[in-house]
Image (cartoon, rainbow, N blue to C red):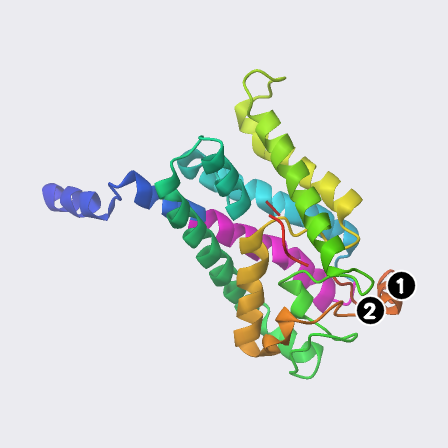
Amino acid sequence: MEQKKKSLKQRLVLKSSLAKETLSEFLGTFIMIVLGCGSVAQAVLSRGHLGGAITINIGFPMAVVMAIYVAGGVSGGHVNPAVTFAMCFFGRMEWFKFPFYVGAQFLGAFVGAATLFGIYYDAFMSFAGGKLLIVGENATAHIFATYPAPYLSLVNALADEVAATMFLLIVIFAIFDSRNLGIPKDLAPVVIGLLIVVIASSLGMNSSCAMNPARDLSPRLFTALAGWGFEVFTTVSPIRHTDTEDFWRGEGVMAESPHQGSWK
């Protein structure tokens, strides 16, 4: 009997290291989206009574921290195609792993968005009378993806995301550079979370510095398929700036903004 249990257990254990790493990236990205976008959902669906800019700018980075702690020991906890690309480009990871990591990240983000929608389904249905809106004071699409401010040009949006992603990657590589000032390995995810807080607080006005293609594109695709419509790929600024002012009084909702760069 014990031998049968042991053999069953052995069958269930993943023996391929690549399979383990792929599953790790899926799980890490899944956690990041459910908890990260969840912080936005709680703020928006409660109309600012149970969250706001501060809880989002803390909640999302901490979701990244938790994701890295879950996946870091197996795959490195990239949870971001930009990070994976940089690791391959600088020779820290083999290129053949790239499509597996990125595919897992995009899939994990999509499933995470679907899970969050399921968790808050009743709240979504009651928020705007069952309507899933992209713009206006009852907009909810920006819970899942980021959108550019109305004044932002395409060139400026691209520069904004490239700059935010550049700072993200520079500091991440600095953190793990053995020749640099060292930090305890188990605290690295926390430092990365603090880095995202800084970037979101200083470079988030134009487009909320998505910095992660999987974090933005997969949830955006989910909203397109789930009822918001494919206008989620063309809409600029889901809410008016006056609505943002109302948000601080607990009367409105607050938008995030676009995607073109790449951990949050």
- The answer to whether residue 225 of the structure is visible from this angle is yes
Q: Position of residue 135 (x, y in %)?
A: 74, 75
Q: Where residue 264 sits in the image (x, y, percent)?
A: 62, 48
117 in magenta: no
- Considering the numbered disc 1 on the image, is that residue within a helix, a strand or a loop? helix
Pick whichever, 138 or 236, lies toward us. 236
Q: Quadrant of residue 181?
A: top right
Total number of numbered discs in the rendering: 2
Q: Is residue 66 left or right of residue 166?
A: left
Q: Which residue is mark 2?
A: 252
Q: Which residue is farthest front?
A: 155
> Toward the viewer: 132 or 99?
99
Q: Is residue 148 left or right of residue 229?
A: right
Verify CB contact (< 8 Å) between mark 2 and mark 1.
yes
Q: Is residue 12 left or right of residue 59?
A: left
Q: Is residue 201 above or below residue 53?
A: above
For image coordinates 63% across by 48% down, the residue present is 211
| Residue 142 drawn at (x, y percent) | 68, 65
Magenta stretch bounds? 26-48
Q: Earlier in the sequence, mark 2 or mark 1?
A: 1
- Residue 21 in view here: no
Q: Amino acid at mark 1?
A: Glu
Mark 1, residue position: 245
- Relative depth, front residue between 85 and 12: 85
Judging depth in this view, the residue of 218 and 2 nearest the camera is: 218
Helix, strand or loop for the magenta stretch, by majority: helix
Which residue type does callout 2 highlight?
A: Gly
**CA separation in Å, label 2 and label 1:** 8 Å
* Relative to 252, residue 62 above or below: above
Q: Residues within 10 Å of mark 1 (few under 14, many from 20)?
A: some
